[in-house]
Image (cartoon, rainbow, N blue to C red):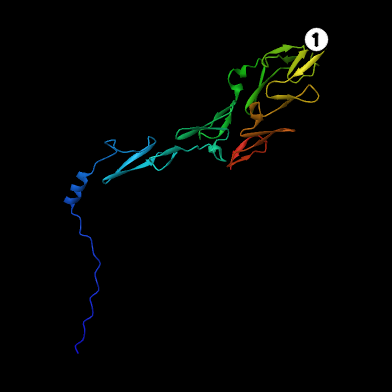
Amino acid sequence: MGLKRAARPLEPCRPAPVSPAFLSFSLSLDVDECAEALDNCNIDAICQNTLRSYKCICKSGYTGDGKHCEDIDECDNEYNGGCVHECINIPGNYRCTCYDGFRLAHDGHNCLDVDECLEGNGGCQQICLNMMGSYECRCRDGFFLSDNQHTCIQRPEEGMNCMNKNHGCTHICRETPRGGIACECRPGFHLTKNQRDCKLTCNYGNGGCQHTCDDTDQGPKCGCHIKFALHSDGKTCVGQ
């Protein structure tokens, strides 16, 4: 018997090379749906033309399949969009804002104290004292601060009334119908149990805190946004 010859292994099929002429012809038949406004991409998506088709990609700040895109609320997370004070969501983006007495830093997220005393002495007649997020007007010896909290009135030496230097009110002094006095506090402060002193709250100048403020029985307690640490002064936040 003769020997059988071994079968030759099958060679894989290889696609025929596409000639440049054929490729050029195919491209000439392609319709740019994006340029011709034939796509059905969402108004908040970008149309990208492909060979004989197209694809839709949602713009930055949006999520979806390109045909349906929804705004991403960057503020709706535990980091508050990276804003140390307030985060405002806007279509496709967001922006940070600061409380009164602060200004937005160059990074667009942190908030820095505004020194109100640098411009016109803060409107104070005599002494302007800048504080974190606010300022106070004070008077020299022999004067007391008027109800408008900016001008100073010279104290008389006699009589137990609001014009007397010994009335004891930290902020505002009111004379009562019976000839006595009653102390009041400026907005953002609470009158203490002794009915004379005023305690700062988070509602005034963010409680003197650069970032976050929580009211406690002992007064405002300051905290810092993520990536910041509380300074030894208990109010300022420094980058880690």
- The correct choice, above or below, for 168 with respect to 68 in the image is above
In the rendered view, does 174 fall on the left or right side of 113? Answer: right
Report which residue position mark 1 lands on: 177
Q: At which x and y percent is residue 65?
A: 40, 43
Q: What residue sits 67% from the left and 38% below the top? A: 232
- At 75% from the left and 15% from the top, the residue drawn is 173
Compared with 7, 89 (above or below) is above
Q: Where, by quadrant of the figure, is residue 121 drawn?
A: top right
> Which residue is located at x 20 percent, y 50 percent?
23
198 or 70: nearer the eye? 70
Spot the residue most to the left.
21
> Where does the N terminus fall, quadrant-wise?
bottom left
Up-down relation of residue 2 to residue 69 (above or below): below
Quarter holding the C terminus is top right
Confirm whether residue 221 shows in the render: yes
Name the amino acid type tagged 1.
Pro
Q: Is residue 9 above or below residue 233?
A: below
Q: Secondary structure at mark 1?
A: loop
Q: At which x and y percent is residue 141?
A: 75, 17
